[in-house]
Amino acid sequence: MAPPTPLLAVRGSEGLYMVNGPPSFTESSAFQRDSGKNCKAVAFSKDGSLFAWCNGEKVNVVSVTRAELLRSFDLPKAVCLEFSPKNNVLATWQAYATGKDGTAGVPNLQLHDLRTGKCLKSFIQKKMQNWCPCWADDESICARNVNNEVHFFENNNFNTIANKLHLQKVSDFVLSPGAQPTKVAVYVPGSKGAPSFVRLYQYPNFGGPQSALANKSFFKADRVTMLWNKKATAVLVVASTEVDKTGASYYGEQTLHYIAANGESAVVQLPKNGPIYDVAWSPNSLEFCAVYGFMPAKATIFNLKCDPVFDFGTGPRNAAYYSPHGHILVLAGFGNLRGQMEVWDVKNYKLISKPVASDSTYFAWCPDGEHIVTATCAPRLRVGNGYKVWHYTGSVLHTYEVPSNEEMWQVSWQPFPDGVFPERAVRYQAVPSEVPGAEPKPAQAYRPPALRNKPVTSSKLHEDEPPQNMKPPLGGGDKPLSKTALKNQRKHEAKKAAKQEAKADANQGPAQAPAPQNAPRNAVPATTTGDPEVDKKIKNLKKKLKAIEQLKEQAAAGKQLEKNQVEKIQKEAALLKELEDLELGV
C-alpha cells in the first residue's frame, strides 16, 4: 500500500486552506476553505488525523481523514490551540483580562473533552509563554507550572492534583517523550549568589535532591532551553545570559551542557567562541549537532561522550534541521543571512546540494523525509510572502506567491506517526522539476568608478574552514587534536625535519666538492665535534664572521661605518684563528 500524501495547511489574509503535498500540489478537498480574514490560530493533532482552527467566531475541529466537522466551541477570542497526544483533550488559550473595577478576570485556559464536547477544567494562565499543559505521550500524566511549582494530574482528571514538584522557584520544566516511566527536567534560576541548576527526576519520585536522577549547576544563566532526545536518555541544556559582560557579543553569552538520565553530565566544549545559534538532536538519539561561533559559524556533530564526530567547517548558517529519519541534515542561514542551505548525507558525511531560499522565515521537513517547505511569512516580512516546496536534492517542485496586497501568516505540514513513511536511499542527483530554478544572482560588491573597468581581485573577510572528519582512526583511542595542538605538532615536525637535514649535511661535509674561488673565506662546511659546547662556539664564531663579511661589503659600497663596526672588522683575524683552532681539535 502506497504511503499517504501529507497535506500543507496555509493560513493568511486569503483565508485558511490545505494543499495536497507532492506530487500534485492542488487544493485539498478534505478541508473546505475558510475564506475569513480573521483566522488567528491553527493546530494539527500529533498523529495528523484532526485539525483545529479559530476563525474569530468559533473554534472548529475537523477530522482530516473523514473530512467532517467533529466539534465547534464558542471561543471567538482564542489565539492558541493544542491537542493532547492521544486526541482526547483540546487546550485553548485567550488573553487574560481583569474586570474594569480591578477584580480578577475569568479563567482563560480551557481544557475540552473532544469526545463529549464538555469543558473539563478552566485555569487562570496570565502569560502566553508556556501556556499549554504538557502531557506524557500516553496521556497518563499532565503537568503545568503554577506559582513556581509543577502540578501533576493523572489520566486527565484535572480536579485532583496527583503530585507536586516543589523547589525554590521552578522557572521551567520539560517532560520526556516516549513510553513510561516519564522523566521531568526542571530549571531553577540562581539567586543571591547561588548557581542556577537543572535537575532530572523520574515521576513520581520527587523527595528532595537525593531522589534526582541527575543534577547540573551553572552560574552563567538568565534563561535555559532544555531538549530531550527521542529515547529520553539525555537532555541538552543551552544556558544563556542576556548580557555578555566581556563585551564580545551583542547576543549575550551561551554555554551548552549535556545531562544524562544515568547521572552523567558535562559541558560541551565548542572550539569556536561566540553565540550558540542552534542545537538539534538526531532522531537516533545517539548524536547531536550544534551551530555556534562568530560568523562564519561552525557546525559540529557530537556523540554522547560530547566528543566531536564530524566538523562541517565554517559557513553562513544559524540553524540545523535533521530529517524525520535522521539520515539527512540541513544546515541553513535564515533571518539576517541570505538563506543558503547545505544538505548533508550524515551517514557518509557527503554534501548532497546547496540550494538558496532567500528571505525565508520558516523551514520544515515534510514527514516523508524527502521534501522541505520554506516560507516567507508576515509579520516577520510583509512583502514577497509565499512558500516553496523543495526536494532535498535542491530542486524546487512547487512555488506559490501571494498577491502583493495579501499576506501569508503560517504554513504547516500535516504530521504523521513514526513508521508511516519508509526511509529511502539518499539521492545525489537533482530530481527533475517543472518549476524553473530561479537562482538569485549574488549581490555584487560596490566598486568605485575608478576600478570598474579593471579586473576584479577576490578578497575575503574570512577564510572558510573545510569540513573534516573528527573520528579517531580505528585502533587509536586518542581524541582528535584541537586547532592549536595541530599547529604545534606541525611546527615540531618541521623542526625535527630541519635537524635531520642539518645532520645529513654535516655527515656529507668532508666529502663535498671544494668551495668556488669567489666564496667568502668563512664559508666552511658544517662540522660536528661531538661536544655540544664546542659546536655551539663554532656556530657563534661563524655567525660573527658572516656579519663581518656583510660590513666589509657595505664599506666597499661606500657606506660610512660606525666606530664599533670598524672594531668588529679588525677582530676578523683573531676570530678566524679561534675558529681554526676549534675545528682542528675535531
Image (cartoon, helix red, strand yellow):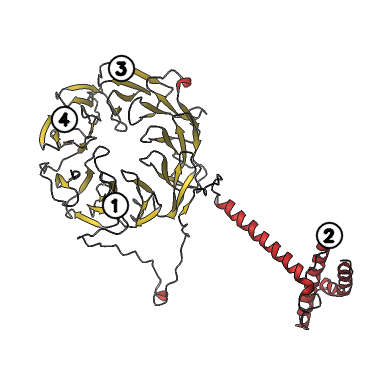
Give whichever of discs 1 and 4 has the lower sequence position. Answer: 4
Give whichever of discs 1 and 3 has the lower sequence position. Answer: 3
Which-is-in-front pick, marks 3 and 4?
Answer: 3
Report the amino acid beneath label 2: Asp
Report the amino acid beneath label 3: Ile
Secondary structure of the residue carrying numbered label 3? loop
Q: Which residue is mark 3?
A: 161
Q: Position of residue 86 (x, y in %)?
A: 23, 29
Give whichever of discs 3 and 2 has the lower sequence position. Answer: 3
Instruction: Please report the residue visible at 22 percent of the width from the left and 34 percent of the height from the top.
Output: 45
Q: Which residue is mark 4?
A: 75
**Label 1 to label 4: alpha-carbon separation:** 32 Å
Q: Residues within 10 Å of mark 1 (few under 14, many from 20)?
A: many
Give whichever of discs 2 and 1 has the lower sequence position. Answer: 1
Instruction: Please report the residue visible at 58 percent of the width from the left and 53 percent of the height from the top.
Output: 486
Give whichever of discs 3 and 4 has the lower sequence position. Answer: 4
Task: Compare residues 395 and 100 and report the one nearer the observer.
Answer: 395
Contact (CB < 8 A) between labels 3 and 2?
Answer: no
Quadrant containing the N terminus in the rendered view: top left
Quadrant containing the C terminus in the rendered view: bottom right
